[in-house]
Image: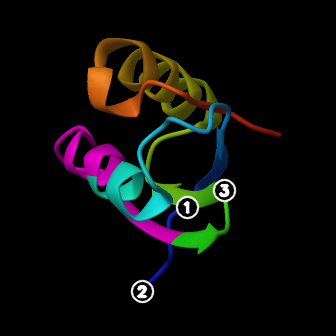
Amino acid sequence: MARTACTEAVVERAAPTAAPPETAVIRLVSALPDGWDCTWRLEEDRILLRIEPAGPAAVHAWLAGALVDSGGLRGWRQGR
């Protein structure tokens, strides 16, 4: 079975008052659109996401919206 390509994205804690990474990743994963799968890894104040089958443009647009729309993710931003 062929694997679909995945898109990697990074979310970084930008404010000391932001939710802890363990909480933020749960909020992000629960906001994923239907049909998207995600694996993740925490690195201190960074969350590394691997999302499939969506492409980079769709993932980054969704992530930008999720970070703006969710008060629970205030203080987190897209990283590089």
The numbered mark, 3 or 1, whose residue comes first in the sequence reads 3
Residue with the mark numbered 3: 45
Residue with the mark numbered 1: 50
Residue with the mark numbered 2: 1
Residue for point 34% across, 45% down: 28
Work out how far the residue at label 2 is from the one at label 3, CA to CA, in angstroms: 35 Å
Work out how far the residue at label 2 is from the one at label 1, CA to CA, in angstroms: 19 Å
Q: Amino acid at mark 2?
A: Met
Is 35 displayed left or right of 49 in the figure?
Answer: left
- Front position in the image: 58 or 74: 74
Where in the figure is residue 54, as x and y percent of width and height? 46, 42
- Front position in the image: 17 or 24: 17
Work out how far the residue at label 3 is from the one at label 1, CA to CA, in angstroms: 17 Å
Residue for point 29% across, 57% down: 26
Question: From the viewer's perspective, is the residue at label 3 or at label 1 nearer?
Answer: 3
Q: Which residues are magenta?
A: 27-40
Q: Residues within 10 Å of mark 2 (few under 14, many from 20)?
A: few
Residue for point 63% across, 31% down: 15
Q: Amino acid at mark 3?
A: Asp
Where in the figure is residue 63, as x and y percent of width and height? 48, 29
Question: From the viewer's perspective, is the residue at label 2 or at label 1 nearer?
Answer: 1
Q: Residues within 10 Å of mark 1 (few under 14, many from 20)?
A: some
Question: From the viewer's perspective, is the residue at label 2 or at label 3 nearer?
Answer: 3
* SS class, disc 1: strand
* SS class, disc 2: loop
Q: In the picture, residue 19 is in which quadrant?
A: top left
Q: Is residue 73 above or below residue 64?
A: below
The numbered mark, 2 or 3, whose residue comes first in the sequence reads 2
Count the marks: how many?
3
* SS class, disc 3: loop
